[in-house]
Each structure stands twice: as C-alpha cells, then as structure tokens.
Image (cartoon, rainbow, N blue to C red):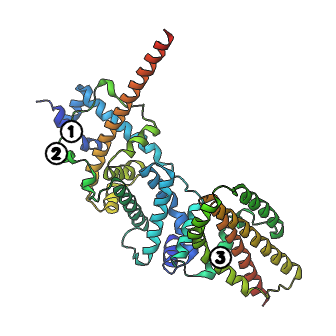
Amino acid sequence: MALMTCRAFLNDLRLRMEGTPSLDAEAHIRNCPSCRHITEDLNAIHSAARSWRAEEIEPPAHLWASLRLQLEREGLIRDDRGSQLELSNSGWFSRWFAGLPRPALAGGYLVLLIAVAFGFSRPANRQANEARWLEGTQVSTSPLSAQLTAEQVSFASFNDSNPAVTASLNKNLAIVDNYIALCEKSVQEEPQNEVARDYLYEAYQQKADLLAQMTERGENNR
Amino acid sequence: MPEAEAIRLAQQGNAAAFERLYRLHNRRVYSLCLRMVGNTAGAEDLTQEAFLQLFRKIATFRGESAFSTWLHRLAVNVVLMKLRKKSGTETSLDELTEPDEESGGPRRDFGGPDLRLSGSIDRVHLQRAVEQLPPGYKAVFVLHDIQGYEHNEIAEIMDCSIGNSKSQLHKARMRLRELLHEATRDKAREDRKAASADSGGED
C-alpha cells in the first residue's frame, strides 16, 4: 500500500480536526514528525482558545447607563412612568441600600458625590471644555433633566399623611438637586471625563428614584 | 422576567424589558467584541452599537430564529463593519480571508521539529495573533473556538454555508499557527540579541 504524502495529509487535515480521521492519515502521522507537529500545534491552539470559553467578561456598569440614555434620546423607551418606577426598583443605589432609611442614605450619597465632584474638578482646560460640554453632554442629558423637572413640578403640592415623611422627602430632593448641580459643574469643567458623566447620570437616577417614591406615597394616600 | 416576555414588552418600549434583555446577553456580546477587537474601549463601543441596533429593530423580531442568534448576528455584523472600515475597504466576507487560501492545498508546508507550539501558547500571544487574523477568519475562530458556537449556528450568524464556516475555521487555525511561530521566532531573536548585548557588556 502506498503511503500518504504530506500534501495529501495536509489536504485532509481539516477533516481530521473535525473528528473524522482516515486510516491512511493515522499511518502517515505515526511516521512523519513534521505533520504530527502541525496536528499537535492545531490541537494546542484549539485547547488554548477553549480555555477562554468559560470566561465571559462583565462589561463596565456605565455601558448600560450610556445605552439607556441613547434609547431615551431616540424615543425607543416609551413608558416614561414605567421607566421611572423601574429605576427606583433596579437602580444600583436601591439594590445596595434597600434596607436603610432614605434620609440616612442621603448624607452618605452627598459625601460621595461631593468627593467625586471635587475630585474631577480641575481648573485646567475649563474654557476649552465648556464648548464641548455645551455641544455634547448637556444635549445628551437635557431630556432626562427636563423630564425630571416636569415631574417635580407636578409634586409641588405633595403632602404625605405623615408631615415628617413629607419634610424628609422634600429635604432629600433638595439635596439631590444640589448633587446634580455639583455634578453638572464637574462635567462642564471636564466633559471628556466619563466617570464624572456617569455620576451625573446616577444623580439623575437618584432624583428619579425619589420622585418615584413620592408618586407611590401620593397614590397610597389617596 | 422570562426572555420571551421581555422581548414582547421591549417591543412596546418598556424600559425594564430593555434592561432585562441587556442583562441577559451583555456578557456574551461584550466578550465577543473584546476578543474580536482586543481592547476594552473598542469593545464597549461595539457592544453599545450592537444593542442599539438590536433595540432599534426589536419591533421587527418575529421569533423565526433564536433571539440570541439574532443578537449575535447583529453583533458580528457590527464588528465586521468596524473592522472593514478600519482596514479601509468594503469587502465581502470571502474577501476578508487571504487571497491565496482558496487554491486547494496549503500555502506552504509549515512546521518542523524545532517549531512546536504545544504547551507554549499563552493568552497574550494568542490574543495578539487573533488580532492579526483577517476579519472573516477572526469571526469564525472567535465564535467557534472561543465562544463555543457550532458550525450550523455560525452559518446562521454569518449568513454563510456550514462548509464555509468549517473551511474558514481551519484556515484561521493554520494562519494562527503561522503567526504564533513568527512571534516565537521574533522572541528568540530578541533574546539572542539581549544575550549577546549582555555578554558584550561584560567584556
């Protein structure tokens, strides 16, 4: 029987790698170190790639915030009220601190945001960045900001049956408005800073969270 | 919320449903993009673009194929478009392979006792080599060998035949082998240079 040539072996190598080896190819590989090494190399590449398979990598958290913002800008998210309630239930703030009283959390949130705001506020490039902010971020966040302001107007006469709760929620709303102002200032100064922009977005989320709570309490009191 | 319900609600513009679908699939799409482009900034842009396209078109999804296959088809197309733009050409998938690969036999007889890769492939080297693959090879290799798709799924995702998927995978592995050998040779050359510089310095 004529032995298989290296060229014929290489022509059949794909089938062999797919799991259908021929007897001729098996005989050839036993006697040909060069073709055996090619096969071993391909198996090593396949094994190295497979070892990656189990590792699915989590994308950064800001990606969803950015995507959601874009969906809002394009009008793909249509259930505005539903989206606010969903924010209140699934936002990172709510998930992490679900069991704690809101007034206590607001202080911590203030500290965090102030730290972030000051951390990212650098005087350099302020004027150059101002124009970019006006053209970029302000456009991208203004629909959300305007929507929240409109919602807030509708709560101007909000009154819970418990005056302490009303006072607490209104106080927290004022605090969050201050966070937003600080974050907007930071982003104006460094519009290219994605972290600062994420915090601004999260400050908006926090406001939406509070407004959603006020909605719920308002409906429960009726 | 089950996926089918999330799809139905997302088709009505429900924000929670969009987020649910994103959370269900973001890891797989991001991993695919990261392995295709090799850098996080590019992978983030492509992941966002893939999901944007998905959500823009979700109203047209009728369930003829699996939702994940549909999403991955979008993601692969987004990545391939990006890679085509990067290379400055508008080409078909077949043209994204190498021109002399369709001649039937191997381009040259690779290998030899001094060039074995077995046991020496680390991820950094493999990732670098994958980045150098032509986009069509890269997509099939990442989908099959790394992401674990079967050829019939890849054929659906990439809109090609099963045979074409198998053929491209084999060529991708052969090309990777060549690239890894080149890297090994370059490294050996650099090591020799460094060693001779060290011994020269000692004189």
A157 vs A193, nearest the viewer? A193
Disc 3: which residue:
A145
Q: Specify whether disc 2 shares its chain with disc 1.
A: yes
Q: CA distance from mark 3 to mark 2?
A: 61 Å
Which quadrant of the structure image shows residue A148?
A: bottom right
Three-letter code, disc 1: Arg
The N terminus of chain B sits in image quarter: bottom right
Name the subunit of mark 3: A
Three-letter code, disc 2: Ser
Residue B103's disc number: 2
Instruction: Report x, y in % for residue A135.
Output: 56, 70
Please tell me whether mark 3 or mark 1 is closer to you in this view.
3
Instruction: Report x, y in % for residue A212.
Output: 71, 78
Which quadrant of the structure image shows residue A184?
A: bottom right
Horizontal side, residue A7 vs residue A158: left or right? left
Secondary structure under the numbered disc 1 in the rendered image: loop
Secondary structure under the numbered disc 3 in the rendered image: helix
Three-letter code, disc 3: Ser
